[in-house]
Image (cartoon, grey):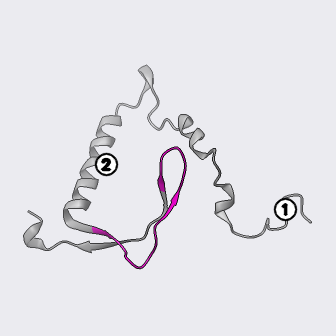
Amino acid sequence: MSVWGDDAEAFRPERWLDDHTGSLNKYFVPFSVGPRACMGRNLAYMDLMLIAATIFRRYRLEALTTTKMIVHETFAREAAQCEIAIKLRDASNSG
């Protein structure tokens, strides 16, 4: 038996999922805060919104009916697994 456990060599990323994963969100500060905050923060957020809007305008996202959606029950419900199909929208409907 290894110090790291019997399945230390197995690829199982779900072993790191536990009830405390949300507690690390307070340490995620990608643009910093205060007087030394990133000057490009608003530009980055605007770019992300533009990219998301473009994707939703050009493509139709649909949940696949062949798979069952698995949901983790935590403080707020979140989808653990949901397969989607991405289909190109008809050019006449895209504006």
Q: Quadrant of residue 91?
A: bottom left
Secondary structure state at the residue bearing disc 1: loop
Residue at left offset 63%, top offset 54%: 17
Q: Residues within 10 Å of mark 2 (few under 14, many from 20)?
A: few
Task: Identify residue type, mark 2.
Answer: Leu
Q: Which disc, if any, is residue 52?
A: none
Distance, label 2 to label 1, CA atoms, is: 41 Å
Q: Position of residue 22 (x, y in %)?
A: 56, 43
Nearer to us: label 2 or label 1: 1
Q: Position of residue 18 (x, y in %)?
A: 65, 51
Residue annotated with mark 2: 48
Q: Is residue 63 left or right of residue 80?
A: left
Q: Position of residue 5 (x, y in %)?
A: 84, 62
Q: Is residue 7 left or right of residue 14?
A: right
Residue at left offset 80%, top offset 68%: 7
| Relative depth, front residue between 84 and 76 | 76
Name the magenta segment's main secondary structure: loop
Placement of 89 over or under 72, stated as above or below: below
Placement of 6 over or under 48, stated as above or below: below
| Relative depth, front residue between 45 and 71 | 71
| Relative depth, front residue between 20 and 12 | 20
Secondary structure state at the residue bearing disc 2: helix
Image quadrant in which the N terminus is located: bottom right
Q: Is residue 85 left or right of residue 21?
A: left
Residue annotated with mark 1: 5
Task: Identify residue type, mark 1.
Answer: Gly
Instruction: Report the span colored magenta.
Output: 61-78
Which residue is situated farthest in the bottom direction here? 66
Number of marks in picture: 2
Residue at left offset 79%, top offset 65%: 8
Image quadrant in which the C terminus is located: bottom left
Which residue is situated farthest in the right direction here? 1
